[in-house]
Image (tube, rainbow, N blue to C red):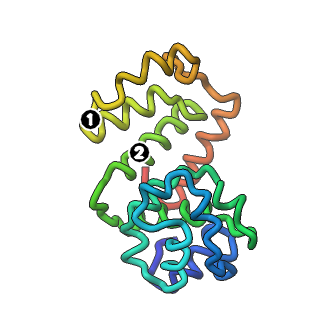
């Protein structure tokens, strides 16, 4: 269902399945966020923007794309708000509204991540990072870290497929069928 620009808070609640209005700005989500220092708006500020219906600001923010979906914010929330789910809903809305970001790296990272999950049923870090680096035109940054990551077993040269790859592809197929985009 295309978003029609109505009440942002209600739309995010519907899509994320979480009680967005329950946030009382305690900021526990922001103090635990590992990527908070890189964000233009901390998770608590994103929640406040949603409350205020500040669609343009929140959908154009880097924060929704930098969110690592680690769920630290969700775990720390005393009101059991799925803040990571809210970030997912906001990314979907931003894509549907074709919001241009001042820095498209987050969007390209998101695209590379989903492409890897679609192909392998899980994230293949080496392939995902290669696709991301090609998309942003920066192949050389951080290349010095690759030998160490390989030696420590943190990266694999070859992908491992998930046992549930058929189910993952079916999820992608249904999502594309639902919103009509490949």
Residue that appears at 65% across and 67% down: 28
| Vertical placement of residue 172 versus 65, above or below | above
In the figure, is residue 119 to the left or right of 143? right
| Mark 1 crowdedness (10 Å alpha carbons): few <14, some 14-19, many ≥20 | few
Q: Quadrant of residue 96?
A: bottom left
Q: Residue furthest top?
A: 151
Q: Position of residue 99 (x, y in %)?
A: 34, 66
Nearest the eye: 115 or 26: 26
- Is 146 above or below relative to 122? above
Image mark count: 2
Residue 21: percent from left, percent from top: 65, 82
Furthest toward the left, the residue is: 137
Distance, label 2 to label 1, CA atoms, is 12 Å
Decide if residue 56 is in sight here. Answer: yes
Residue closer to the observer: 172 or 84: 84
Answer left or right for 27 relative to 92: right
Residue under numbered circle 2: 109
Asked which quadrant contains residue 63, the reply is: bottom left
Q: Residue at x 42, y 40 (%)?
A: 112
Give the x, y percent position of residue 88: 55, 60
Q: Residue at x 65, y 54 (%)?
A: 71
Quarter-wise, where is residue 129 in the image?
top left
Which numbered circle lies on residue 138?
Answer: 1
């Amino acid at each position: 269902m295309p978003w029609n620009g109505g009440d942002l808070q209600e739309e995010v609640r519907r899509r994320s399945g979480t009680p967005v209005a329950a946030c009382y700005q305690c900021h526990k989500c922001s103090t635990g966020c590992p990527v908070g220092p890189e964000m233009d708006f901390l998770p608590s500020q994103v929640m406040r923007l949603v409350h205020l219906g500040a669609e343009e600001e929140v959908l154009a923010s880097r924060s929704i794309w930098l969110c690592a979906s680690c769920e630290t914010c969700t775990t720390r929330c005393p009101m059991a708000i799925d803040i990571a789910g809210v970030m997912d809903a906001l990314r979907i809305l931003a894509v549907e509204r074709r919001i241009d970001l001042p820095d498209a790296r987050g969007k390209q990272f998101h695209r590379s991540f989903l492409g890897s999950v679609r192909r392998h049923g899980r994230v293949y870090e080496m392939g995902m990072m290669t696709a991301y680096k090609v998309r942003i035109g920066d192949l050389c940054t951080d290349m010095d870290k690759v030998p160490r990551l390989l030696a420590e077993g943190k990266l694999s040269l070859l992908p491992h497929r998930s046992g549930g790859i058929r189910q993952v592809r079916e999820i992608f197929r249904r999502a594309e069928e639902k919103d009509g985009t490949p």
